Amino acid sequence: MIESKALTGDDLALADVWAVAVDHAPVGLADTAKARMQAARDLVERAVHGKQEHTYGVNTGFGRFVSRSIPEELTEELQVRLLRSHACGVGEPYPDEIVRAAMLLRANALAKGFSGSRVQTVELLVECLNRGVLPLVPSRGSVGASGDLAPLAHLALPLIGEGEAWFEGERLSGADALTAAGLEPVRLEAKEGLSLVNGTQFMAAYGALGLTRALRAAKAADIACAVSLEALQGSRTSFLPQIQAARPLRGQTDSAANVLRLLEDSAITRPTAGATRSRTLTRCAVRRRSTERAAISSTTSRTRLAPSSTRRPTTRSYWSKTSCSSRTGTSTGSRSRSRSTRWRWRSQSSRTFPSGGSSDS
């Protein structure tokens, strides 16, 4: 039986993502994560019921409507409308394993306790994952800049009994899928819609599963090299550390070391006569894998699945990036005028951005 993974928000590994997404390992929330989440939720509740303080996405509008105050009685509706408005993806649905990985990664991010989501909301997300309620998420629509907004909105809709989801191979409405699994929808409260959609979990899902497959392929390649070396009665001399030191490429050195470890108990002592070509093929095998192993190693060293809190950047710094990237176009003059207009508006917006507006997502 696959061991259950308790999410803390701090120690999720690539192997955990594979186990949950592909092998369907169960998952839950750690007690420490629940305590942090509750503390963050208490902070949000104080902001909701405060008289003076404006907090982005809690009692203000989104984007250009940041200066609009939202009355307390409409804070819940604001979150639901955010999901509905962003659930505009198109195209074929994401594969099940990608959706499962994204659900896990989103729950893990929320488990850090910086987003203000209620424990019961994240627990429902986790239970959907465990019971096989998989939201139907179209694969086209992510903007990337602020995150996988459209895909995550589709992922979140079944939690409130909307959207569509798969359950036991059947495509159902979100409400029917929850009922079939013995679950009940939640009623979103302040900031929870924003917390559910502001992330990059679909990008991370593809990256995590792709990197895991690359690691497995590299391992299989070393095993194939070792088996071939034995079958061809080749020499291990070329794989010795002192030989590899003459060309100190990390990927090649690592691969050669793996092959030597696999051949530790081999009975081969010397190549057979006339096996020169066979030895050349096996000797060059690790050299050919140098670049790919180096790329995998570099990516793995930079991979962190226990993300820090995703923060919404200030309006000025965010739009200065997009304005620079919009210089290309068929009509240079009109593009420049459009860029200038957008920049004036966004500069003004950044000056009116309320304190605390750069909220955790």
Image (cartoon, rainbow, N blue to C red):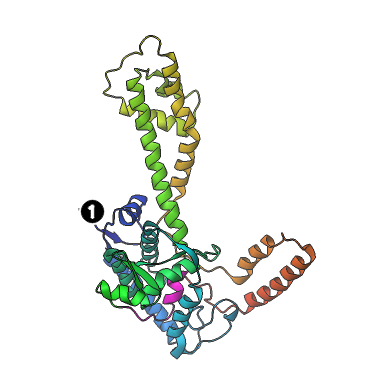
Q: Decide: is 344 above or below 301.
A: below
Residue 361 visible from this viewpoint: no
Displayed quadrant of residue 4: bottom left
Membership of 214 in magenta stretch: no
Residue at the spot 39% in from the left edge and 64% down from the top edge:
106
Q: Position of residue 60 (x, y in %)?
A: 52, 82
Residue 98 visible from this viewpoint: yes
Residue range of the region highlighted in magenta in the rendering: 185-197
Task: Residue lying at the far top in this picture: please name it.
Answer: 273
Callout 1: SS = loop
Q: Position of residue 203 (x, y in %)?
A: 47, 58
Task: Residue lying at the far front in this picture: please name it.
Answer: 170
Membership of 193 in magenta stretch: yes
Displayed quadrant of residue 108: bottom left
Q: Decide: is 254 above or below 175.
A: above
Q: Which residue is mark 1?
A: 2
Q: Residues within 10 Å of mark 1 (few under 14, many from 20)?
A: few
Task: Residue lying at the far right in this picture: please name it.
Answer: 333
Q: Decide: is 350 above or below 221.
A: below
Task: Residue lying at the far left in this picture: please name it.
Answer: 1
Compare residues 353 and 64 and report the one nearer the observer: 64
- Say whether residue 314 is left or right of residue 79: right
Compare residues 80 and 307 and report the one nearer the observer: 80
Mark 1: which amino acid?
A: Ile
Q: Position of residue 244 (x, y in %)?
A: 45, 24
- Say whether residue 12 is left or right of residue 146: left
Residue at the spot 50% in from the left edge and 73% down from the top edge:
86
Q: Position of residue 88 (x, y in %)?
A: 50, 71
Compare residues 160 and 316 and report the one nearer the observer: 160
